[in-house]
Image (spheres, helix red, strand yellow):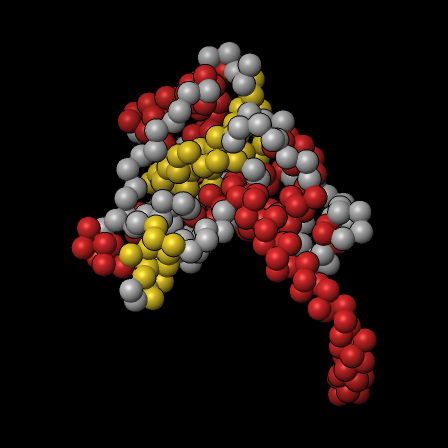
């Protein structure tokens, strides 16, 4: 039996995120799946301290909060649905706090069997104000060890208003059932968006178009002519295997480089600190 976990990044009980997730969970339960629901803001997920202890010492983050309890729940799920609202063009701070802590995924046991599917939702009041929430939500979910098989954007303003849209509710119901049955969830058409992270904002670097979130490189001419992002090169910053590679090839060597000059850095800092205190 499949276990479907729903995570809402909104603090509003029965707001649009929660209502959408619970619609999917109910449909999944109707197919015999086990379901679990977490409101991210009910947990205490503190800011990353930038100490890199999760990559050294015991490979454990020294912050004592609910991060590892959340990762346990995420680790035991067969599929994930995660919904977050757009707040001032961004995902809410609670999601970014979680993303900031993802270096700890390096030291953790991962499900080795086939990729686990996730469906994400970015919910907003106004499509023209959708900002950059969707790809950031998707990146977080990819670093939690899931394959984002569908990334849905919904417009719903007032709390719970999403329930009034029969077409959307029908799709959520369908997605919940498909995930419960372990059947493929077909990707909605999103040709103008980055095919890896679903971002629809880009950096123009002629002759390329570059996705600033996942780093995918596309063909600018195809994009301007056909409105399609076709990946032509570059290494996409995506998922746990990329995280491992990034840590091994960049972060760990940078920590070693810092260790070599730590004494000089501390000595100059001491001098600056004493000048600073003298001025106060
Ligand atoms: C503080 C705040 C900031 C918001 N900023 C945006 C925004 O930048 N763009 C947008 O389209 N909607 C914005 N919204 C609207 C929410 O994204 C929208 O109401 C969403 O459905 C909320 O989901 P919820 O009911 O699950 O909390 C904002 C709402 C709040 C409370």
Q: Quadrant of residue 108?
A: top right
Q: Is residue 232 above or below residue 188?
A: below
Image-based side of 278 in relation to 141, left or right: right
Image-based side of 130 in relation to 146, left or right: left
Query: Residue 28 location in percent, x, y?
Result: 47, 18
Q: Is residue 236 above or below residue 30?
A: below
Q: Is residue 86 above or below residue 184?
A: below
Query: Residue 258 location in percent, x, y?
Result: 72, 69
Residue at left 30%, top 67%?
Answer: 206
Q: Nearer the viewer, residue 72 or 147?
A: 147
Query: Residue 43 location in percent, x, y?
Result: 65, 39
Residue at left 28%, top 44%?
Answer: 191
Assign the N terminus to one quadrant of the image: top right
Q: Nearer the viewer, residue 8 or 151?
A: 151
Image-based side of 114 in relation to 223, left or right: right
Q: Is residue 100 above or below residue 168?
A: below
Residue at left 73%, top 58%?
Answer: 51
Q: Nearer the viewer, residue 232 or 57?
A: 232
Assign the C terminus to one quadrant of the image: bottom right
């Amino acid at each position: 039996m499949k276990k479907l976990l729903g995570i809402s990044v909104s603090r509003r009980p029965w707001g649009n995120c929660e209502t959408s997730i619970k619609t999917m969970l109910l449909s999944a339960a109707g197919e015999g799946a086990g379901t679990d629901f977490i409101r991210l803001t009910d947990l205490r997920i503190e800011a990353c301290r930038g100490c890199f202890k999760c990559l050294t010492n015991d490979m454990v983050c020294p912050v004592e909060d609910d991060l590892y309890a959340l990762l346990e729940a995420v680790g035991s799920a067969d599929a994930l649905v995660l919904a977050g609202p757009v707040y001032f063009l961004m995902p809410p701070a609670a999601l970014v706090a979680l993303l900031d802590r993802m270096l700890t995924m390096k030291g953790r046991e991962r499900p080795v069997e086939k990729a686990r599917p996730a469906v994400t939702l970015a919910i907003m009041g106004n499509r023209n104000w959708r900002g950059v929430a969707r790809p950031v939500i998707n990146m977080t979910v990819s670093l939690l060890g899931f394959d984002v098989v569908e990334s849905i954007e919904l417009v719903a303003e007032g709390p719970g208003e999403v329930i009034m849209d029969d077409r959307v509710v029908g799709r959520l119901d369908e997605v919940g059932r498909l995930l419960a049955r372990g059947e493929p969830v077909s990707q909605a058409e999103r040709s103008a968006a980055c095919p890896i992270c679903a971002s629809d904002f880009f950096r123009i670097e002629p002759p390329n178009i570059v996705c600033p979130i996942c780093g995918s490189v596309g063909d600018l001419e195809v994009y301007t002519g056909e409105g399609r992002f076709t990946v032509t090169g570059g290494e996409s910053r995506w998922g746990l295997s990329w995280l491992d590679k990034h840590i091994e090839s960049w972060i760990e060597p940078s920590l070693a480089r810092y260790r070599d000059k730590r004494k000089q850095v501390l000595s100059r800092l001491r001098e600056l600190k004493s000048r600073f205190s003298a001025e106060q």
